[in-house]
Each structure stands twice: as structure tokens, then as C-alpha cells.
Image (spheres, grey):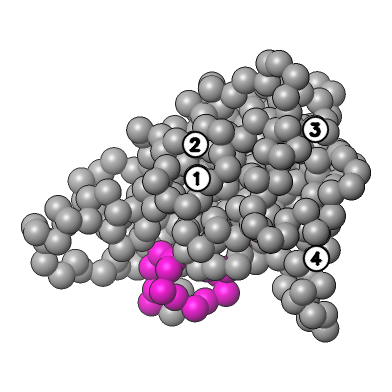
Amino acid sequence: MNSLVWVVMDSCRYDTFMRAATPTVDWFSGFNNVLVERRYSYASWTSPAHYAFMMGLVPHRNVAGVFASEVYKEDLGQWTERLGTGGLDFSKFIPHLSLPKVLQEMGYLTIGRVSLPVLNETTLLSAYFDDYRMMEDHNDFAGMIREMDFSGDRPRFYFFNLGETHYPYMLKESSLPRISGVHGAVRWLDREQESSGPMPFFDEGTMERLREQQVRCVEYIDGLLGELFRKCPKGTHVILTADHGELFGECNYFGHGPVIHEKVFEVPFVEGKVPKT
Ligand SMILES: [Zn+2]
């Protein structure tokens, strides 16, 4: 069995990811076994998308002409290859439908680090993790990587949810309103309700600036991935994806959540095994 590292860039659009300069992802995707694809999320916002992940369902290919049950079965069957082990089929997920539970029972040490408050450690998402914690800082992928430790005999399952690609995209400017309560981060929701009136919607220029900033955030993350790959033992299976996309003015929408638009469901999907470095 090999270790598994699953990185979710929260809110990262597929086209944002493809536009960004990502030399580390390019290096990784140059190996034969590595897949880079456009996929689709099962949900338009953070919580339900992560519940699907914890069921072992990665973003889907939106294939027509097949029954959904066949897609789920095939997808869950992929874990045999991802984990480098035999005898792990669809039935192992029944009835609890929990990837961390399956991994725990196989002997994995299961570790979750999340950035978005809707995923905090008191939620059901933390079930079957040996160690699950919300990071103090919304933008601390570097800290997650620093903590990674593969010593000892047990294979690891690291699950990382990154805040860097989520609004406000690492921007600290006071000109941007705090709209975390609207977009999945509930930490300051009460305070906002006390103090603020209706919020003016973003103009076109702001939308474009934020769209560009999300590209910069992906480039920042790519800059950290080199260290992640260096720490992973050879053969570790790495998944890099997003929980949903983001709208920057399409059809006059911003963000994600209660929105039906293709760009909210379209996500990048990269997976493969870490080569010898
Ligand atoms: Zn999200």
C-alpha cells in the first residue's frame, strides 16, 4: 500500500488552473502515469463537495450514456490502483460510504487539515480521521506541508483543503468586503449581521482583478508543491483538484454556492504517483 495525499484548492476554477504558470505541476504531469483533466464537481459549494470526497468520489467526467451507479462503482474501484493494493473493491465502501474509514481499517494513519470553517473538526467530515484540524490561518498550505511526516511503518492519508484560492484570494486589502458568511466561511457571520447593511455588488473591474488574482494564487500553490513532492515517499498517490469553481461576472454572478453555471462545476483534476526524485 502506498500513501495518499489529496489536495483540494478551494474554489479553483479549471480555466484559472490552466492559465496559471505551474512548473511543478507540469513536471509532475510529464510522467507517464499522471493524469491532468477537466472534471466536474458533484456540488457547487464547499460542504457537499467535500462530503462527496469523503465518500471516496473524486470529481466526475460527466459521461453520457451510462447509469450513474456504474460510474460510482467504477470510480470507487479506482482506489485499488490509487492505493497500490488488491482486494479493495466497491463493496468495501458499503454500508458506511467513508473513504477515511476504509483507509483506517487498512492500516492508514488518516490526517486532515482544512482551511474553510464549514469543514471544521466538529463537523461529520472529521469522522474516521486519526488527526483532523482546521488551520489557524486561512492561507497556510505551507504549514500543512511542513507538518507532513511519513516516518514509521504506516502509510499515510493526508487530506488538505486550501484557503489560498478561495475569496479573498490572499488579498489583504480593506477595499474588499468580508463576505465569508456568504461563501462558506461562517466564523464571522454573526458579527457581519450586526454591523453591515446591503453590500454593493462587485463591478466589472473588480471581478477581473479577482479573476487574475486567483491565477496568482494557483502559481503560489504550485511554488509550494515542490516541497510536498520532495517529502512524499516514492509511489505516493497524489490528487490535486478543486471542490468547485468560481464565477467572476459570468451572467452577473460572483462566487459559487446557490448558482447553476457550468464554471461552478468545472474543476481541474490531476492525479498520479510520485516518481523517484
Ligand atoms: Zn469550497
The yes-or-no answer for disc 4 within 8 Å of ligand 1 is no
- Secondary-structure class at tag 4: helix
| Residue range (magenta) | 252-267
Which amino acid, mark 4?
Answer: Lys
Marked residue nearer the N-terminal end (1 or 4): 4
For disc 2, the marked residue is: 132
- Tell me if label 3 and label 1 are in contact, CB under 8 Å: no
Q: Is residue 249 magenta?
A: no
Which amino acid, mark 3?
Answer: Asn
- Secondary-structure class at tag 3: loop
- Tell me if label 2 and label 3 are in contact, CB under 8 Å: no
- Secondary-structure class at tag 2: strand
For marks 3 and 1, give the one nearer the viewer. Answer: 1
Q: Nearer the viewer, residue 171 or 87?
A: 87
Instruction: Kindly indicate the quadrant of the structure image that contains residue 96.
Output: bottom right
Horizontal and vertical percent for residue 136?
A: 35, 33
For disc 3, the marked residue is: 2
For disc 1, the marked residue is: 126
Report whether residue 17 is seen: no
Which amino acid, mark 2?
Answer: Tyr
How much space separates mark 3 and mark 4, taking CA atoms? 22 Å
